[in-house]
């Protein structure tokens, strides 16, 4: 009888130990996120919610009191509610043997690529608000062909979107690009990023869809900046001519990517670049 009572006591102690161990284990799991490939339990890079300087939770309206914030009104209650969709189109194949931009015109294949991407954009169920394009010849010609599918779509030309070298890539490129070129092009392309990529204004009541026709280096840099990846990584992926990269900026400032370099709509034999 004594032995039986002692056994019950031992089972009770053992059982409580198991319960306590499981409780502690699952509690610790709630506090940390274990990634299979690293022992780092924290994000290697944290997301900057105010990347576009339009995080409305950080904004206040100043009050009447000078030099103090005691009379500041509460944080602005009006917040964006719409999403901004931007479809980035690389230009079509062009004559790379020409020295001047004006002579770097689309090849016959490039013109067909532009028509295919124009038809693809038309097939998508979107009401586009405008087309923004680089002022370089190959981007202008590509967008002119796309616009045949959208004759009433407003057009905006922008020198900031011209091709260039945004930042020295890592790993390094075999291109022999002087540092001053990176400084000049990089500042311009970053200005384009800040101009066109931000969350919707509070006055925008419905989702918008914009087409942007520009260049591979520019698009790749934009994607790295939007996803808050190292911008030096822009050369680690490629884009076909007339491919579509589709990004969305949410009202919260979060960014999503539906496609990078989508070219599945191009027939066999039309993939270049």
Image (cartoon, helix red, strand yellow):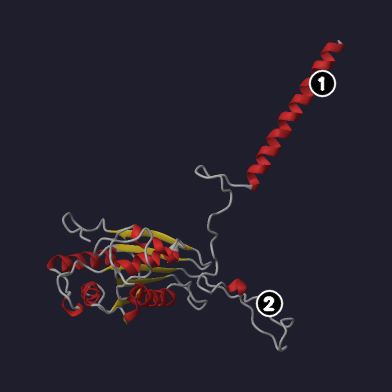
- Residue 261 image offset from top left, x and y in percent: 31, 60
Q: Please tell me how crowded label 2 is: few (under 14), some (14-19), or many (20+) other residues with Cα within 10 Å.
A: few
**What's the mark number on residue 135?**
none
- Residue closest to the eye, 42 or 271: 42
Relative side of 36 to 120, left or right:
right
**What's the mark number on residue 9?**
1
Give the label, 2 or 1, closer to the camera.
1
Residue 189 vs 269, above or below: the answer is below
Residue 103 vs 2, above or below: the answer is below
Instruction: Give the residue at x 82% y 13%.
Output: 4
Relative side of 189 to 92, left or right:
right
Residue 234 vs 134, above or below: the answer is above
Q: Quadrant of the N terminus?
A: top right
Query: What residue is disc 2 on?
Result: 74
Q: CA distance from mark 2 to mark 1?
A: 61 Å
Instruction: Give the residue at x 71% y 89%.
Output: 66
Q: Residue furthest left?
A: 108
Q: Please tell me how crowded label 1 is: few (under 14), some (14-19), or many (20+) other residues with Cα within 10 Å.
A: few
Quadrant in the picture for residue 161? bottom left
Instruction: Give the residue at x 25% y 61%.
Output: 240
Q: Please tell me whether mark 1 sits on a helix, a strand or a loop.
A: helix
Quadrant in the picture for residue 88? bottom left
Task: Evaluate if marks 2 and 1 touch, with contact meaning CB atoms under 8 Å apart.
Answer: no
Quadrant in the picture for residue 109? bottom left
Q: Please tell me whether mark 2 sits on a helix, a strand or a loop.
A: loop
């Amino acid at each position: 009888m004594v032995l039986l009572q002692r056994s019950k006591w031992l089972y009770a102690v053992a059982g409580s130990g198991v319960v306590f161990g499981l409780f502690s284990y699952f509690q610790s799991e709630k506090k940390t996120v274990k990634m299979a490939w690293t022992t780092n339990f924290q994000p290697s890079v944290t997301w900057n919610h105010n990347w576009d300087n339009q995080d409305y939770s950080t904004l206040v309206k100043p009050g009447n009191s000078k030099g103090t914030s005691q009379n500041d009104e509460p944080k602005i209650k009006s917040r964006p509610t719409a999403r901004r969709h931007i479809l980035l189109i690389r230009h079509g194949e062009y004559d790379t043997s020409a020295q001047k931009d004006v002579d770097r015109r689309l090849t016959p294949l490039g013109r067909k690529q532009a028509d295919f991407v124009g038809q693809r954009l038309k097939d998508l169920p979107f009401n586009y608000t405008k087309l923004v394009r680089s002022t370089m010849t190959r981007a202008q010609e590509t967008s002119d062909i796309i616009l045949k599918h959208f004759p009433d779509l407003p057009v905006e030309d922008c020198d900031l979107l011209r091709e260039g070298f945004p930042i020295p890539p890592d790993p390094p490129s075999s291109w022999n690009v002087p540092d001053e070129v990176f400084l000049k092009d990089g500042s311009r392309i970053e200005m384009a990023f800040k101009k066109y990529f931000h969350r919707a204004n509070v006055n925008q009541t419905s989702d918008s869809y914009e087409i942007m026709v520009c260049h591979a280096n520019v698009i790749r840099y934009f994607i790295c900046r939007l996803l808050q990846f190292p911008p030096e990584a822009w050369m680690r992926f490629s884009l076909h001519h007339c491919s579509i990269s589709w990004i969305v900026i949410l009202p919260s400032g979060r960014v999503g990517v539906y496609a990078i370099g989508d070219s599945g709509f191009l027939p066999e034999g039309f993939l270049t670049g």
